[in-house]
Amino acid sequence: MRTLRSFALLAATALLVGACTAQEAGPQSEPQSGPPRDISRITTGELQSRWWSWAASSPARSNPVADQDGTFCAENQPVDAWFLAGTFGGKAERRCSIPADRPVAFPLLNFTGSEAECKELMAEAKGTVMLDRTEVAVERVEPTAIRITGVEGNPVTGQAGTVTTQGCGLWVRLGTVPAGEHTLTIEGSAGSFSLSVGYALKIG
């Protein structure tokens, strides 16, 4: 068993990676291609597994979570959804162009680790999301079994292959956004960790 180093991330967003069990490298269990899907209908386990695997699909130098201005917003996006990412804590201001037919989803705060660790972190998790000055409903996701597949040198798992763990957090399934320009603001905190991310979105 190998234990992953704990750290915090945000994906338009925050992530705390706790202890995970390393598996042999293998194919991801959740689809990453195909016709557009209704992101609101997939399970929380699939949503989390897919987002985390997306966040782990790029090395640190081009990782959308480490990105400060949106340069890597489109990095490795699946064809049936569009994921937003955040920082390893602190603030970021990004610009991002998104195809008009892509349903958007992202975690406000999300965590991985044991079920007990997830519950402890969720007890302190809070935050808000604003789209064009309108508050967006946030989904509270309790501990769920997930799989994360990453590449070597990624800043999420730090290694190539697949890990299994429990995932939880505060999530937004924004769906498709009307064509045009929009502003998205994400703010969240859990204990001593806090984040603030602003997105200037261009849809279409």
Image (cartoon, helix red, strand yellow):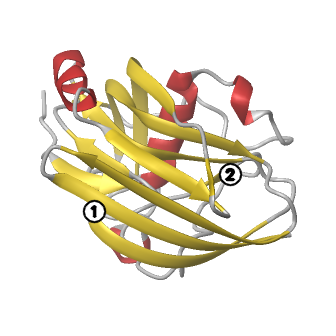
Q: Position of residue 84 (x, y in %)?
A: 55, 57
Secondary-structure class at tag 1: loop
Q: Tell me, for residue 78, which label it has, or none.
A: 2
Query: In the figure, residue 89 lies in which quadrant?
Result: bottom left
Question: Mark 2 vs mark 1: which is more N-terminal?
Answer: 2
Q: Amino acid at mark 2?
A: Pro
| Label 1 environment density (alpha carbons within 10 Å; few <14, some 14–19, many ≥20) | many
Q: Are marks 2 and 1 in contact (CB under 8 Å)?
A: no
Query: In the figure, residue 200 lies in which quadrant?
Result: bottom right
Q: How far apart are the alpha carbons under marks 2 and 1?
A: 22 Å
Residue 19 relative to residue 200: left or right: left
Residue 119 relative to residue 154: left or right: left
Between circles 2 and 1, the one closer to the viewer is: 1
Q: Position of residue 156 (x, y in %)?
A: 31, 52
| Label 2 environment density (alpha carbons within 10 Å; few <14, some 14–19, many ≥20) | some
Determine which residue is flagged by label 1: 88
- Report whether residue 27 is seen: no
In-front residue for pair 135/200 = 135
Quadrant in which the N terminus is drawn: top left
Secondary-structure class at tag 2: loop
- Is 138 drawn above or below residue 180 in the view shown? above
- Is 78 drawn above or below residue 140 in the view shown? below
Q: Position of residue 159 (x, y in %)?
A: 27, 51
